[in-house]
Amino acid sequence: MKSFDYTITDEAGIHARPAGLLVKEAKKYQSKIVVKMGSKAAEATKLMAIMGMGVKKGDTVTVEAEGGDEDVAVNGMKAFFENNF
Amino acid sequence: MIEFIGKSVYKGIAMGKVLVMGKEEDIVKREKIEDTNAELLRLGNAIKKSQKQLQDLYEKAVKEVGEASAAIFEVHQMMMEDEDYLDAIHNMICNENVNAEFAVATTGDNFSDMFAAMDDDYMKARAADVRDISGRIVRNLLGREQNVMSQPEPVVIVADDLSPSETVQMDKEKILAFVTVHGSTNSHTAILARMMNIPALVGVPVDLGKIRTGMVAIVDGTSAKVIFEPSAQECLTAVNKIKEQEEQAKLLETLKGKENITKSGKKINLYANIGSVSDVGYVLENDAGGIGLFRSEFLYLGRDSFPSEEEQFQAYKQVAQTMANKKVIIRTLDIGADKQADYFGLEKEDNPAMGYRAIRICLKQQDIFKAQLRALFRATAYGKISIMYPMITAVSEVEQIYKIAGEVKRELDEAGIIYQEPEQGIMIETPAAVLISDELAKLVDFFSIGTNDLTQYTLAIDRQNSKLDEFYDPHHPAILKMIQMVVDNAHKEGKWAGICGELGADMELVKTFVQMGVDELSVAPSMILKLRQIIREMD
């Protein structure tokens, strides 16, 4: 399993539309990708669960990838977070 | 025959079939089903149909209101693909043997409750989105109409109230009139009706339970009356009035291309107010001399984050180019008070009309202001753009604005980006600005009097409160005196002064304004030719 931490800098946090893009990105990989924050966790392919976490600016999330392409997945997701959040 | 009186926001008369919106009973009954596979198939088809509708809506909205405002329909599509949501519906159908309608409605309620319980206003608002997508699937399962787009004939829209997202979904060609139970004369519906040139009544005490889609209705904006199921005699009267109206419209057509000049040779400029790029069509169609008020808020509202400088630049450039060297006065961000966007993170205020809004936000959060100014200055290279600043109360505010504009220009110079020096003016919409208009006139190129706010601040009447309508006198002598004072002070410094509030389109006051020496009236596009007619008949 690979993972990285990321602190949200976008004013809006993980809002509806970027959350939708996040789901699209996560679906590109075979690995199971999970977003965690404190006691909350959601699979990155599940839009409403991701939105339901209510991630705001300044929050730090941990993104984990586990599976055959976990190296590629974690790099891809990291780049995605940096560009969008 | 059932008759109601409401408040008219646009004169004119229309007759046609009614479409009742939003109040149809979406009550779903729980039914036991035997064949779960057949039920899953029905569900799959309804979802496919819903996705197709959302895709159509998205494409329509992109054309009409732009990518940013259309994004909501893309989000709806994504939500409808959500695995948890779909799994929950499937499980209910398979494990509890219930009908698809019930499974969708119940799952929708559960998910929307989750959002509603969140400690974040933006996410709370997403509860409505979940209910919206679930309602759409249910309506498709029940084989009900979704909205006006699927109506073959033009209709009279009757609704409790209409949200901007509902009006976006409508096919503008197929609307004859609006009748709403709620909504003020400043509501979104009212603005849309004026833009589209169709009769509209708000605050009509209709019992929606008694009105059915398909009934015939006459909507008369002049008497503020709507008649459902009219008698033959009433229909005849309406047909005659409609004929008269059409003749009047033809007469107005002949005024296109003519000057706004009185018999004794006094001239006035008639410009148009618009709220989005797509409104430019109405401006040209009605032969306006320019755009006197382009509300830039549309770029900021109905979205999740700030519009980029590039996005704004493209919008301003498009309008400037389309108007082909006619004047385009763009008002900088006027948000706060009654116009809010969640991502601004504005705190709730007890008195938002007197609170943190418009230029006050721009001067405190200069990064937002600078991005807009950069976009505006860049766009000056493509047409005749003027910049107008709202909610000014002091000379020092104008000085601060010029300082920031100066920094923006320096940055553009350094980057080698070309721009023209635009006219810069201010809105006069506070009594303070009126009283110091002699000082302000030395600093700015023009004044535009925003009569809606000026009246509300002068008379101490909240314009959102419909209870106060009887106290609201738009022709109050205090307002007229203020207008005269502003015009005189502008002229003393060789500057021009216009009016861009509702009052500018007041047909009873046009003559007064011309006599006062007002240089420009900026009004809804549909009012241009009517005002031109009055002016040309003046001595």
Image: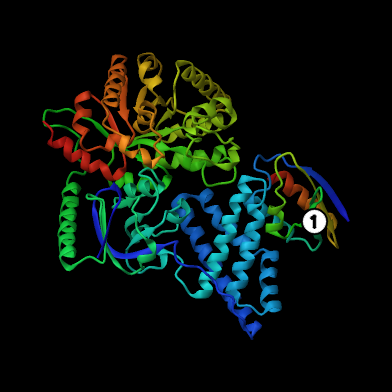
Q: Position of residue B518 (x, y in %)?
A: 26, 26
Q: Residue at x 81, y 53 (%)?
A: A74
Observer-nearest of A22 and B100: B100
Q: Position of residue B2 (x, y in %)?
A: 27, 63
Left or right placement of residue A79 versus residue B428 in this view: right
Residue B47 occupies quadrant: bottom right
Q: Position of residue B242 (x, y in %)?
A: 19, 58
Left or right placement of residue B509 versus residue B455 in this view: left
Observer-nearest of B224 and B240: B224
Q: Say if residue B326 shows up in the picture.
A: no
Amino acid residing under circle 1: Val
Q: Residue at x 14, y 28 (%)?
A: B265
Q: Residue at x 39, y 17 (%)?
A: B440
Left or right placement of residue B216 versus residue B261 in this view: right
Report the residue marked by disc 1. Answer: A34
Work out whether A17 lies above or below B155.
above
Image quarter where the C terminus of chain B lies is top left
Q: Chain of mark 1?
A: A
Work out whether B114 lies above or below B345.
below
Q: Residue lying at the far bottom in this picture: please name it.
A: B34
Work out whether B183 lies above or below B498.
below
Q: Say if residue B117 shows up in the picture.
A: yes
Left or right placement of residue B337 versus residue B188 in this view: right
What is the secondary structure assignment of the residue under circle 1? Answer: strand
Observer-nearest of B280 and A34: A34
